[in-house]
Amino acid sequence: QSALTQPASVSGSPGQSITISCTATTSEVGTSDLVSWYQHHPGKAPKLIIYEATEGPSGVSNRFSASKSGNTASLTISGLQAEDEADYYCCSSAISTTFVFGSGTKVTVL
Amino acid sequence: DVRLVESGGGLVKPGGSLRVSCEASGLTFSAYGMSWVRQAPGKGLEWVSFISSSSGRLYYAESVRGRFTISRDNANSSLFLHMSSLRAEDTAVYYCVPTNSFAWSFDYWGQGTLVTVSS
């Protein structure tokens, strides 16, 4: 069982916005601001879309945004597109556990 | 462009050993910490191990500590994971991932190599 809990699935229609939550179940992981988010199309290489909780790497669509409040980090996808259908994972770095991934969320575009 | 090519995966019996490798290009390999991350069939991503740029710091997930050893060869831009006492639950695609030591993020990913542990 991951120390970071995500909803198993989230869905939305094209053009809508959806938000994926990532909640830490331990305070050690929850206090870290070193949260990153990854998009993974099955069979392909995962892709970094957010780092340091809110920052987007160059080249990543600005339709992806993120925030963090307390023990919960959130990823929002705006203007949902068919190509956004994928699995999304949060990841946090904490001193003793080093890295822990969230349980993953399957995004479906209706 | 950054290119990461993992190799060495295959079928191994429970209790056996295997070494997977990764060759990196398009980045200053010696400046990056490196990690192995795996994904078991139908499961999520799981961080396995980290090695600092100079090999001075080595970290392992509890699930593999004492069985897996990470190492690197900066001269040849290569990363290795030696796996022993393999179990069925180690079956996964193993990804070699450059690790940003400031943001603690995994900035680039390859296609991975599949390790199957089965009798």
Image (cartoon, helix red, strand yellow):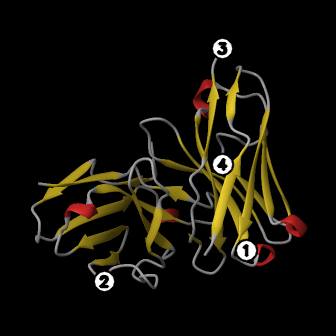
Which residue has dot 3 on it?
Answer: B119
Q: In whole angstroms, how far apart are the C-alphas of marks 1 and 4?
A: 19 Å
Closer to the chain start, of discs 1 and 3, is 1
Label 3 and label 4: CA atoms lie apart by: 25 Å
Mark 3 belongs to chain: B
Q: In the displayed structure, would residue B81 be above or below residue B85?
A: below
The image quarter containing residue A38 is bottom left
Q: Are marks 2 and 4 on the same chain?
A: no
Label 3 element class: loop
> Comparing marks 1 and 4, which lies closer to the viewer?
1
- The percent position of residue B17, horizontal first and vertical second, equals 79, 30
Image location (x, y in percent) of residue A53: 42, 77
Question: Under tag 2, what secondary structure?
Answer: loop
How many marks do you count on the picture? 4
Q: Amino acid at mark 4?
A: Ala
How much space separates mark 1 and mark 3, taking CA atoms? 37 Å
**Which residue corresponds to mark 1?**
B32
Q: Tag 3: residue type?
A: Ser
Q: Are marks 2 and 3 on the same chain?
A: no
Please report the residue visible at 33 percent of the width from the left and 78 percent of the height from the top: A67
Disc number placed over residue B61 in the picture, else none? 4
Tell me the SS state at disc 1: loop
Q: Residue at (59%, 32%) from the top-left corner?
A: B91
Label 3 neighbour load within 10 Å: few <14, some 14-19, many 20+: few
Residue at mark 2: A62
Q: In the rendered structure, which disc, 3 or 4, sits on the residue that comes first in sequence?
A: 4
Q: Left or right: B8 with respect to B88?
A: right
Dot 1: chain letter = B
In the rendered image, is residue A80 in sight?
Answer: yes
Badge 2: chain ID: A
Disc 4 chain ID? B
